[in-house]
Amino acid sequence: MDNGTKLQKNRIFIVLLLVIGILGAWNLRLFWIQVAASRSLTERKIDLVENSVIQRAQGLVLDSGRGDFVDRNGVPLTGTAQKVLVVFPIHEEESADTSTATDRVASIVNAPLSAWQSFVRQLKGPAIWSVSGRPVPLTDAQAAKIEALGLKSVRAMTFNQRYAERQPASQVLGFIGQNPERITRQFTDQFHKGELQLTSKIGNAGLEKTFEPWLQGIGPSYVSLFTDGLKRPLPGLDTRQIAPSNPYYPLKVVTTLDSGIQQQVEQTLERLHVTEGAVVVLDIRNGDTIAMAGTPTFQPEHVDLAQGNWSNKALKAVAPGSIFKTVTAAAALEEKAVKADETFECTGALGKYGFTCWKKEGHGMLTLEEGFAQSCNIVFAKVAQRLGGDKLEAYAHRLGLETPIGWSGDVLTRKDFRQWDAEEQGQIYASISDKSDKGALVQTAIGQRDVLMTPLQAANLVVTLYNQGKVASPRIVREIRFRNDRLYQSFPPHELEPAAKPIKPATAKRLLGWMVETVEHGTGKALHTAKWSMAGKSGTAQVTLKNGRPGENHWFIGYGPAEQPRYAAAVLVQNVTEGSGHKAIPLFKEVMDILADSSEK
């Protein structure tokens, strides 16, 4: 063998060794991925096989896996399951029958053929047939007809629509959306574990926000179109539904709301053309929230943060006007500042501070009880002069004002958890010096000057009187349950931690009786035509409108039926043009009529 041949054989041998080395290294790499890496990634809950399949899949989320809200009777408030038309970018085998069948889908869903064909042409992945951005629900008959066509490119599938087009209790529930800053600040552990991404949608207002830790699910349910490397559907694996299999999650949050009453109250606000205001209905026995509605409303899927209509009106503090006279009256009775048969003269003006009565000609001689029923400003100004500013504020505290009153407490590992989002505490005085200002004192006594109260506090004031002076802490959520309906966490009703001792039961009972007098002989006489006998207190607060002109807040708080009280309510019609007829009294009547009708069912 010559040297040339020998050298050539050596080169071939070296090349073979290199090929064998490369193949060996490649096999070791594959072994590491399949065994060593899979074990490591399994510990981090990353499934390589599943992820390799997902890379070849074009998915459509049918259910986010987020927990939902239900009312006190289990009626869903969010998360309506409905049949929808899911369309896949699959080319059916060409035939006249197939083409006709595809076009028949448009007829079944009542869609213009041109719009349908345009929708199908632009598909890049599975999509739901929608109109104006909202999925079009299918009837059972439509779904059956679509499935009977036997097409691979269209399917009738169940989709979870979180919010209704006219979402009940939208201000109470709030909305979800992206909030990267809050995710990194408040949910750091979940972010680092990969359970939340910066693009994840979380609760940004209302119950969606406060109950976010319990609403997060364990993963979405979705349908996927599986394709090969050239994005062609894989035979026998074209579409596949994938969903987490867990009997316990997602959790559901059981509210205290009655969805039937809630929706009727919202319809009433719309029918009476209330453009700005709120209604709160509480169970008078324990303060549970039966209905809470505010206007203007908003659509949780289309939120304009700048407008602010997503903010819960029932938790925002505004000038209360004469409903605050309930506090002044309680202080007068408790402090014995007024004798039982004592009368006060109202000539229409106090004679100082520019203070006047709403009745310009005056009420004449009135007792404190008559002054309450007629809502006489002069009577309450004179009583306040005897009490002083410190006493007024002290009794406001004893009745649950100037403090957040919504349910709070320790829940599992969360200390001082609050059910209500962004509840305002209100105020009595804007500064300490105002307490000694005699002009401020008489204005404060009738709920003017710097006094602010939320509709929730106003309704709860009535609950407090009914419960002999004990201040309830209103709930909006009763419990959280597992998916299989087993109890996860309850929120028992409780009283507000008292800042001071409550008023006497006798005082509370007397004020409830004065509310009856207000409806029978005073400013609430228009309620005589209601289906229930009622009791309450009216209020009109002077405010300045956005255009700088004078305006009014119209209030009515009360309870019904008067003989055997079941509900306490507060209604507010806000920023009304000055001099308009009292808008809150007819609204209160309509709300109580709704409650009367519901009690008969």
Image: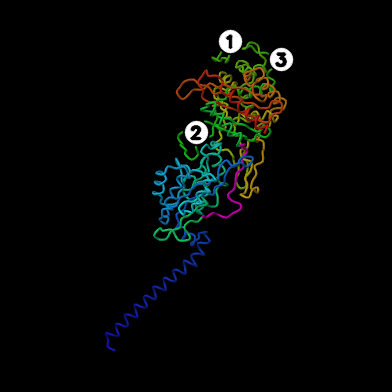
Q: Are marks 2 and 3 in contact (CB under 8 Å)?
A: no
User: Which label's residue is closer to the chain start, 1 or 2?
Assistant: 2
Q: Quadrant of residue 341?
A: top right
Give the spatial CA distance, label 1 vs label 3. Answer: 24 Å
Which of the two residues, 501 or 371, is positioned nearer the viewer here? 371
Residue 3 position, x and y percent, is 27, 86
Residue at (52% x, 65% y) in the render: 39
Name the residue type under label 1: Glu
Residue 580 position, x and y percent, is 53, 19
Check the image and report above or below for 404 versus 547. Answer: below
Residue 247 position, x and y percent, is 61, 53
Give the spatial CA distance, label 1 vs label 2. Answer: 41 Å
Check the image and report above or below for 210 versus 264. Answer: below
Name the residue type under label 2: Asn
What span is in magenta? 241-258
Instruction: Find disc 3 in the rendering and name its residue.
Output: 341
In this view, the mark in front (2 or 3): 2
**Magenta part, dominant SS:** loop
Instruction: Count neighbours of disc 2 (C-alpha within 10 A) and say few if under 14, some if 14 to 19, many if 20 or more.
Output: some
Which of the two residues, 233 or 408, is positioned nearer the viewer here? 233
Instruction: Find disc 1 in the rendering and name its residue.
Output: 361
Name the residue type under label 3: Asp
